[in-house]
Structure formats: structure tokens, C-alpha cells
């Protein structure tokens, strides 16, 4: 019930993405605050065999697409993989103590369109696509954590071997670059939250 309540909370919070402001309503159910979600997020690399619902997948995607984006270009594109054979193909030779791609409920591949059409109809390079995709990836991770799910950001861009595998397995078209691969599932582990607070990394007014 706790997980369902968290899902409803997050879904309500992100429903405003596609809802007129006058129709948006604040969630009525109490849940983790944004600050609590950010401060307690952790990378989860082991998952149960429980699947994600279509509602959970859509909520995660809505959260990702609510990210900030330069000039509102929204260059992000997503490939969601739940088929076991495709997950295994994505795992490829990337072996370690855990086969995260094979074991997770779904893989979210965050991709970006690297060009956009200018006002004159000319194709222009989008220098912000990686920043936009990074913001979308972080939103996805935070939403997963708020929903009681586990997820981890695994690098794809700019590593050619990983990018080429994703392009080949998923049929990603030219002009779209795979940026990050995020396995998501119901957590089978509860790792400690890392304290990354370092005052020595902060400068006020000037360096």
C-alpha cells in the first residue's frame, strides 16, 4: 500500500505536465518531500522479478519529460525495454557482479536529438542536448525513488562501444544519440545513502 500511495503521489505531482494550470490539483496524500527524495536517492543495482505496471512506466516518463530544457527544444527521446531477449541483448558483454539490464523490470534508454530546425529551416547543432538529457535522466531517477522503485544511471554516451550496442540492438536512427541507460525495478537491496556534502567544494561571491 505504501508503494501504491507513493505512485499516486508522484503521478499527481507530474500530471501538471500535460494539464492546464487551472485544472492542476495538489496531491491530497502526504508523501516524501522533494528535498527528502533528493537527499535519500541512491543507486540500486539488484532487483526482484516483479514487473512494472504501464502506469508506473508512464509516470517515470512524465517525470523525465518535466525536466528543464534549453530553448524548450525537448531533444530527449526514450526507448523503454521490457522484453527479456532485448534486455539480454543490451546486457551484451557488460558483465559484472550483477547483470542489471537482464535482471531489471525495464530499461529506460535516454536518447537525444543532436540537431534542431532553425527558423530559416536550416539544421542547427544543439549544443545543449547532453545537459537536457542529463536533467531528464535525473528526474527519472528521482521519480523512481519517490515511487519506491530502484534505479541506477549507467553511462552510454560518449563511450562508442556502449553507444554502438544500443544503436544496433534498439534500431536507434541517425541523428539520435543514446545518452544514458537506466535499469529500473523493484529493489532487492537497500544500499546506504552516500553523504556527498563537502563544504570545501563551495565558494561564495568569488573563487
Image: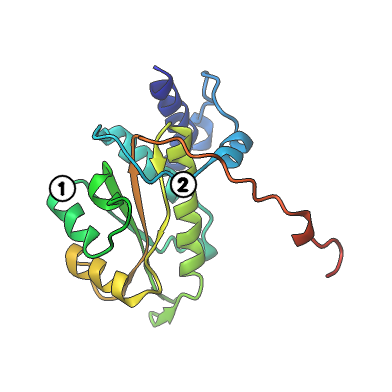
Which secondary structure lies at badge 2?
A: loop
Q: Position of residue 43 (x, y in %)?
A: 46, 46
Alpha-carbon neighbours of circle 1 within 10 Å: few (<14), some, or many (≥20)? some
The quadrant the C terminus occupies is bottom right
Task: Please identify the quarter of the rendering in which residue 5 is found.
Answer: top left
- With 6 as the anchor, is 92 left or right in this view? left
Residue to which mark 2 is pinned: 43
Q: Can residue 17 be seen in this view?
A: yes
Residue to which mark 1 is pinned: 84
The quadrant the N terminus occupies is top left
Q: Which residue is drawn at 46% across and 54% down?
A: 136
Vertical arrangement, residue 199 with respect to residue 112, above or below? above
The disc, 2 or 1, on the residue closer to the chain's N-terminal end is: 2
Q: Between 37 and 97, which is closer to the camera in this rendering?
A: 97
Which secondary structure lies at badge 1?
A: helix
Vertical arrangement, residue 92 with respect to residue 43, above or below? below
Q: Residue at x 50, y 43 (%)?
A: 42
Q: Between 151 and 170, which is closer to the camera in this rendering?
A: 151
Amino acid at each position: 500500500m505504501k508503494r501504491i500511495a507513493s505512485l499516486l503521489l508522484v503521478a499527481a505531482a507530474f500530471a501538471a505536465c500535460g494539464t492546464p494550470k487551472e485544472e492542476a490539483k495538489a496531491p491530497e496524500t502526504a508523501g516524501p518531500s522533494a528535498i527528502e527524495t533528493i537527499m535519500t536517492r541512491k543507486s540500486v543495482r539488484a532487483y526482484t522479478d516483479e514487473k512494472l505496471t504501464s502506469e508506473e512506466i508512464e509516470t517515470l516518463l512524465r517525470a523525465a519529460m518535466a525536466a528543464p530544457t534549453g530553448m524548450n527544444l525537448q531533444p530527449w527521446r526514450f526507448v523503454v525495454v521490457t522484453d527479456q531477449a532485448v534486455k539480454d541483448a543490451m546486457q551484451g558483454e557488460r558483465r559484472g557482479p550483477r547483470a542489471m539490464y537482464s535482471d531489471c523490470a525495464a530499461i529506460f534508454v535516454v536518447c537525444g536529438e543532436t540537431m534542431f530546425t532553425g527558423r530559416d529551416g536550416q539544421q542547427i547543432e544543439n549544443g545543449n542536448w547532453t545537459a537536457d538529457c542529463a536533467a531528464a535522466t535525473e528526474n527519472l531517477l528521482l521519480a523512481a525513488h519517490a515511487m519506491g522503485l530502484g534505479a541506477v544511471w549507467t553511462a552510454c554516451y560518449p563511450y562508442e562501444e556502449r553507444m554502438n550496442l544500443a544503436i544496433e540492438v534498439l534500431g536507434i536512427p541517425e541523428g539520435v544519440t543514446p545518452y544514458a541507460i537506466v535499469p529500473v525495478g523493484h529493489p532487492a537491496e537497500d544500499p546506504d545513502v552516500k553523504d556527498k556534502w563537502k563544504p570545501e567544494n563551495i565558494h561564495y561571491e568569488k573563487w
